[in-house]
Image: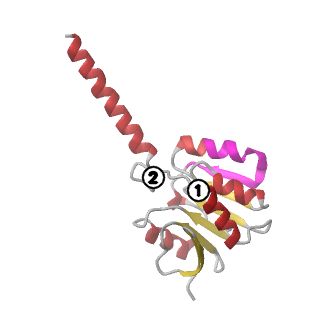
Amino acid sequence: MASWVGVLVLVVLWSVLGVLAFWFMGGGKGAPFLPVRQKDIRDFLSLVPVGEADVVVDMGCGDGRVLCAAAERGARVVGYEVNPILAGIARWRLRRFGDRAVVYRRNFFDANLQEATIVTAFALGTIMPKIVDLLDVTTQKHVTFVSFVFRAPRWREIGSKGQVRVYTRPS
């Protein structure tokens, strides 16, 4: 009897861990959480002049490190994160920027990009075409798109450094 209880506890524990891992890794709603390296953030900021006139939107902001770097340059920042734990961490990191920083706990396909001057994403290559479709429909004409690692189809690459690629809308 005791051996069956042990097996049952292990099965339940393994199942719970599996569900948590699936949920933490994006749960089929987007990309898994892979934190952007500090080097890539420095490369982003060396390629794109982020300043007080900018509204930076991070699609899938994770723990908020890209948003913090942009806010430190004076930008207003908006993050979208589906994972409530990561959204909470991002909000905690951004609290010092007050009204200039907000993180929404929702899927980035529901993002409001109308005011964005710079949009960033660290999304899988399979999701990138959908992001580009969203950018085509919902962003200003002169928006800059920054992709970490994966290429953005149809948009014109205007710079790159390491794993950071910077794009502008095709003419």
Q: Main secondary structure of the magenta part?
A: helix
Question: How many labels, in total?
Answer: 2
Comparing 26 with 102, the one in front is: 26
Within 10 Å of disc 1 (Cα), the crowding (few <14, some 14-19, many 20+) is few
User: Is residue 92 in the magenta section?
Assistant: yes
State how the image is colored: secondary structure
Kindly identify the residue that appears in the image at 74 percent across and 68 percent down.
50
Kindly identify the residue that appears in the image at 50 percent across and 73 percent down.
132
Residue 33 higher or lower than 148, as above or below: above
Q: Write the start and end of the magenta stretch as one range.
A: 89-105
Counting from the top left corner in percent of width and height, residue 31 is at 45, 56
Q: Amino acid at mark 1?
A: Arg
13 lies left or right of 26: left
Residue 119 sits in quarter: bottom right
Q: Amino acid at mark 2?
A: Pro
Counting from the top left corner in percent of width and height, residue 71 is at 74, 57
Comparing 22 with 148, the one in front is: 148
Quadrant containing the C terminus in the rendered view: bottom right
Report which residue position mark 2 lands on.
32
Report which residue position mark 1 lands on.
37
Quadrant containing the N terminus in the rendered view: top left
Residue 59 higher or lower than 170, as above or below: above
User: Is residue 30 in the magenta section?
Assistant: no
Kindly give the residue lying farthest to the bottom in the view shown. Answer: 171
Counting from the top left corner in percent of width and height, residue 155 is at 52, 80
Residue 157 sits in quarter: bottom right
Residue 45 sits in quarter: bottom right
Within 10 Å of disc 2 (Cα), the crowding (few <14, some 14-19, many 20+) is many
